[in-house]
Amino acid sequence: MIAEHRDTLVRPGNLIGENGSILYGKTLYKTTPVHGRTWYHLYFDPARKDKVIASFMQKLRTLKDELEADKLVESHRTMYERYFTVRETPVRGRSVNDNDQGKNLRDLHLPDHPCTVAKDGGSNRQEETQALV
């Protein structure tokens, strides 16, 4: 659902400004045979997006430092393989480079656009945070 509305959520008409914070919100109405009438409330927080990206970049920097120092952490192995290329030569020693995948935020597998979906339908209400990618 979020992917369908990614391009239309951040618009002036969806702006919600409170106490100096900026959020974007949108309400969708759908009728389904299973849930009946349901309203979906989408919210996007650009400040939170920036924090998530900065935190992830710090994590990548830490991983690169671990690789350069040859002090690997076993639980980080998947991320090492996904985001870095390590080369060792007798003359130049160890070289750690970013993979091409690390150049594009869409390929980083992180919630670069955190978005909250609140679902109202009948007597139940559910909330979940998903990536707006």
Image (cartoon, rainbow, N blue to C red):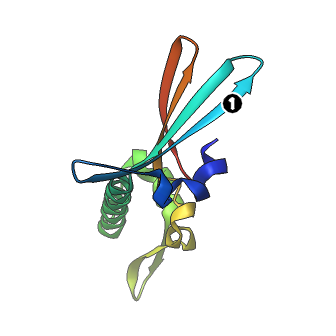
Q: Nearer the viewer, residue 91 or 86?
A: 86
Please name the residue shown 53% across and 60% down the image.
Answer: 82
Q: Residues within 10 Å of mark 1 (few under 14, many from 20)?
A: few
Residue 69 % position (x, y): 29, 67
The furthest residue to the left: 19
Please name the residue shown 32% across and 65% down the image.
Answer: 61
Q: Nearer the viewer, residue 45 or 63?
A: 45
- Residue highlighted by disc 1: 30
Please name the residue shown 38% across and 59% down the image.
Answer: 53
Q: Looking at the rendering, which quadrant does residue 46 occupy? A: bottom left
Q: How many marks can you see?
A: 1
Tell whether 65 sits left or right of 125: left
Residue 35 % position (x, y): 68, 17
Please name the residue shown 37% across and 62% down the image.
Answer: 60
The furthest residue to the bottom: 91
Q: Nearer the viewer, residue 70 or 32?
A: 32
Dividing the image into 4 quarters, which one contains the N terminus?
A: top right
Residue 87 % position (x, y): 48, 76
Residue 56 % position (x, y): 37, 57
The furthest residue to the top: 123
Tell whether 19 sits left or right of 59: left
Which residue type does callout 1 highlight? Lys
SS state under label 1: strand
The furthest residue to the right: 33
Dividing the image into 4 quarters, which one contains the C terminus?
A: bottom right
Depicted 118 relative to depicted 113: above or below = above
Depicted 119 relative to depicted 100: above or below = above
